Image: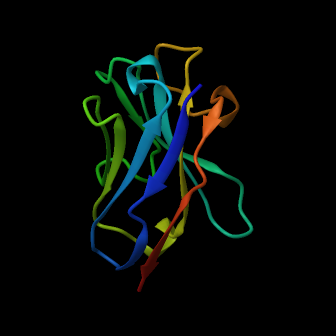
Amino acid sequence: QVQLVESGGGLVQEGGSLRVSCAASGRTISSYCMGWFRQAPGKQREFVAAQSRTGLTSYYAHSVKGRFAISRDNAKNTVYLQMNSLKPEDTAVYYCAADNSRTSGSSDPDEYEYWGQGTQVTVSS
C-alpha cells in the first residue's frame, strides 16, 4: 500500500499563489489515480482535482478550473497542486488521495483508498 504526506500549505494573500505537494512512499504513484480534496471548517470534504493513472488526463472542480493545476513527478513519486489567483473561499485543509481501482480520475472521495493527513491553506483578504 502507499503512504501519502502533504506539505507546502501556509498563509497567502488573496490573489497569490501556492503549491502543495504530496509525497508518496511504499508504492509508485504510477499505479494510482491521484486526487486532491479540501475541507473547510463546518463543511464537507469536497473534490478539487484528480488525475488519471497515466497522468494524461486531469479533472477539476468548477470552482478551481483555470486557477489550479494538478501534476505529478513520477521520478520523485510526488503529486503537486499548483494554486493561482487564490481566494479566501479556497481556505481549507487540503488532502491528497490515491485510488488503484480505476484508470481514470474520480471526484468521489469514496473511490479513494489512501489519504494523507492534510495541509492547511489559508487565504487572507
Outermost residue toward the right? Answer: 42
- Left or right of 125 in this view: 98: right
Which residue lies at the image location 66% right of the left edge and 51% below the top edge?
Answer: 45
- Left or right of 21 in this view: 76: left
- x, y percentage for residue 80? 34, 46
Which residue lies at the image location 59% right of the left edge and 25% below the top edge?
Answer: 1
Image: 47 above or below 88? above
Count of marks placed on residues: 0
Outermost residue toward the front? Answer: 26
Which residue lies at the image location 33% right of the left edge and 23% below the top edge?
Answer: 57
Image: 117 above or below 61? below
- x, y percentage for residue 9? 43, 66
Outermost residue toward the bottom? Answer: 125
| Residue 97 visible, this orientation | no
Q: Which colouring convention does the figure follow?
A: rainbow
- Left or right of 45 in this view: 58: left
Judging depth in this view, the residue of 64 and 52 nearest the camera is 52
Judging depth in this view, the residue of 7 and 16 nearest the camera is 7
| Residue 57 visible, this orientation | yes
- x, y percentage for residue 60? 42, 40
Which residue lies at the image location 28% right of the left edge and 61% below the top edge?
Answer: 84
Quadrant (top left, top right, bottom left, bottom right) of the C terminus? bottom left
- x, y percentage for residue 83? 32, 58
Judging depth in this view, the residue of 97 and 83 nearest the camera is 97
